[in-house]
């Protein structure tokens, strides 16, 4: 069944709705929370704070993903491209709900700066979309590659990653990592252009600022 294209007003209202639901409503996942193979062990207060900091960073990443995909869908030139962004955003919504739930389980909260992160990412998505379909998809490929590497660092067996006993958080991160890789691959197969090294470096620098701030605030 062919979906009737949305008008410009409808697309704008949909973007506003995504922003409000992302920032102020309880996120709901279509898929169940990933279950670890082994139960989580009792975590020390220090381990809980560290795990919460990392999961808060991951939650911010999902807030940014909603903003980025919403803006790119708004500027998409074809219905096929818009559908691709919408599909990825729905899977990212699962991540948003999972990380929010895990933060609650750890007795913590999302970043207080989420509106700022959302606005910045929405602006980036608008710029990417205005640069053309292939460039916009290139931003998806590079974003997902950086996110995938970031999530991999959380699964490392050292003090920088999630506590080894926090199998609940690790199961969520592992599931997210698989989805991110799939989104990047889909964008690449759809004809994404590779971004310049300077653009990649700038994106990585901005991501480092975000992650270091969101860990605490």
Image: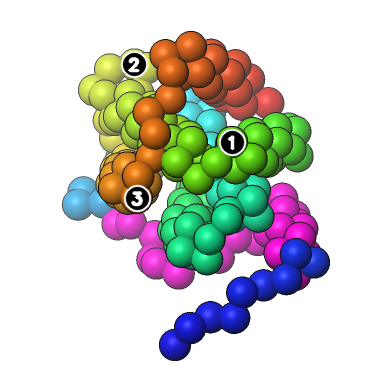
Left-right relation of 65 to 159:
right
Instruction: Say left or right for 91 vs 10.
Output: left
Q: Residue at x 53, y 31 (%)?
A: 57
Front-lying residue, 2 or 91: 2
Where's residue 105, x and y in %? 51, 49
Quadrant assignment for the C terminus: top right
Furthest residue toward bottom: 1
Q: Quadrant of the N terminus?
A: bottom left
31 magenta-colored = yes
Which labelled disc corresponds to residue 190? 3
In which quadrant of the rendered view does residue 22 lie?
A: bottom right
User: In this image, 74 relative to 61: left or right?
Assistant: right
- Residue for point 52% across, 66% down: 79
The magenta stretch is 10-35
Please name the residue shown 38% across and 66% down the image: 32
Q: Residue at x 26, y 51 (%)?
A: 36
- Give the crowd class for mark 3: few <14, some 14-19, many >=20 residues within 10 Å: some
Query: Residue 197's x, y, as percent?
Result: 42, 14
The residue labelled by disc 1 is 131
- Which element type, helix, strand or loop, lies under badge 1? loop
């Amino acid at each position: 069944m062919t979906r009737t294209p949305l008008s410009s007003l409808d697309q704008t209202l949909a973007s506003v709705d995504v922003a409000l639901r992302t920032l102020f409503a309880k996120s709901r996942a279509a898929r169940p929370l990933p279950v670890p193979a082994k139960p989580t062990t009792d975590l020390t207060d220090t381990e809980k704070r560290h795990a919460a900091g990392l999961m808060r960073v991951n939650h911010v990443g999902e807030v940014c993903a909603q903003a980025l995909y919403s803006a790119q869908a708004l500027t998409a030139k074809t219905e096929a491209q818009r559908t691709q962004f919408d599909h990825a955003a729905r899977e990212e919504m699962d991540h948003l709900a999972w990380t929010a739930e895990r933060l609650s389980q750890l007795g913590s909260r999302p970043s207080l700066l989420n509106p700022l992160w959302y606005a910045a990412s929405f602006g980036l998505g608008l710029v990417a979309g205005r640069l053309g379909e292939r460039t916009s998809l290139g931003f998806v490929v590079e974003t997902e590659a950086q996110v995938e590497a970031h999530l991999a660092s959380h699964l490392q067996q050292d003090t920088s990653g999630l506590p080894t006993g926090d199998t609940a958080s690790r199961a969520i991160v592992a599931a997210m990592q698989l989805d991110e890789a799939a989104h990047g691959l889909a964008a690449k197969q759809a004809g994404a252009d590779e971004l310049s090294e300077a653009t990649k470096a700038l994106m990585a620098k901005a991501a480092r600022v975000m992650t270091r701030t969101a860990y605490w605030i």
